[in-house]
Image (cartoon, helix red, strand yellow):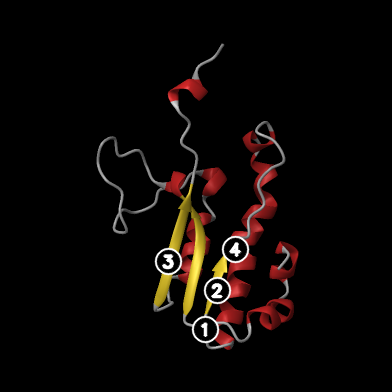
């Protein structure tokens, strides 16, 4: 399903009908690393995580689907140094990824929910300036 369809509840209901589980990986990343620096470049992604996920959740509920897998973002956790991060660790998003919490709240009521955390982990070689 195309991300723009997520904004229309009627468009979302048809494709999810008849499934046992839904996996939502919809996202809209800025077009370049430079654009990622600008808060305005994240607006469409914010809309997907708020309005889009809420519509998808409603469509899933109306179709009686009980399993939902939601894309999330690992970089919403505060730095914990050597401490482990698990399901009980609260997220601490910053301005550019604050809407991750909106998406996670939208799916929190499902009995069978899983959040997949994506993120970047550059190696030390990648971080070196040449």
Q: Tell me the distance, in whole angstroms, between the alpha carbons under discs 3 and 1.
A: 14 Å
Instruction: Name which residue lies at 74% across and 64% down.
Output: 4
Task: Check contact, mark 1 vs mark 4: CB within 8 A.
Answer: no
Q: Give the mark nearer the N terminus: 2 vs 4.
A: 2
Q: Label 3: which residue?
A: 114
Q: How crowded is mark 2: few (under 14 residues within 10 Å), some or many (20 or more)?
A: some
Discs 2, 1 touching: Cβ within 8 Å:
yes
The residue pinned by badge 1 equals 65
In-front residue for pair 20/47: 20
Q: Quadrant of residue 32?
A: top right
Residue at (55%, 68%) from the top-left corner?
Answer: 23
Task: Please tell me the numbered disc located at residue 22.
Answer: 2
Q: How far apart are marks 1 and 4 (CA)?
A: 20 Å
Q: Do the numbered discs 3 and 2 sit on residues whose CB atoms are within 8 Å?
A: no
Q: How crowded is mark 4: few (under 14 residues within 10 Å), some or many (20 or more)?
A: many
Sequence order check, earlier mark of 3 and 1: 1
Q: Where is residue 104 in the image (x, y as percent from the top left)?
A: 47, 63
Question: Which residue, as the protein is rendered here, is positioned at the far top?
Answer: 130
* Tag in front: 2 or 4: 2
On the image, the x and y values in percent for residue 125 come to 47, 21
């Amino acid at each position: 399903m195309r991300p723009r369809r997520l904004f229309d509840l009627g468009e979302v209901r048809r494709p999810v009908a008849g499934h046992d589980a839904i996996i939502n990986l919809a996202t809209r990343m800025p077009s370049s690393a430079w654009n990622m620096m600008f808060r305005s470049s994240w607006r469409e992604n914010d809309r997907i995580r708020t309005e889009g996920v809420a519509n998808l959740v409603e469509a899933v509920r109306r179709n009686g689907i009980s399993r939902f897998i939601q894309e999330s973002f690992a970089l919403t956790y505060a730095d914990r140094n050597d401490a482990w991060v698990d399901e009980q660790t609260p997220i601490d998003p910053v301005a550019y990824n604050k809407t991750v919490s909106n998406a996670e709240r939208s799916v929190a009521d499902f009995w069978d929910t899983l959040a997949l955390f994506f993120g970047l982990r550059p190696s030390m070689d990648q971080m070196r300036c040449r």
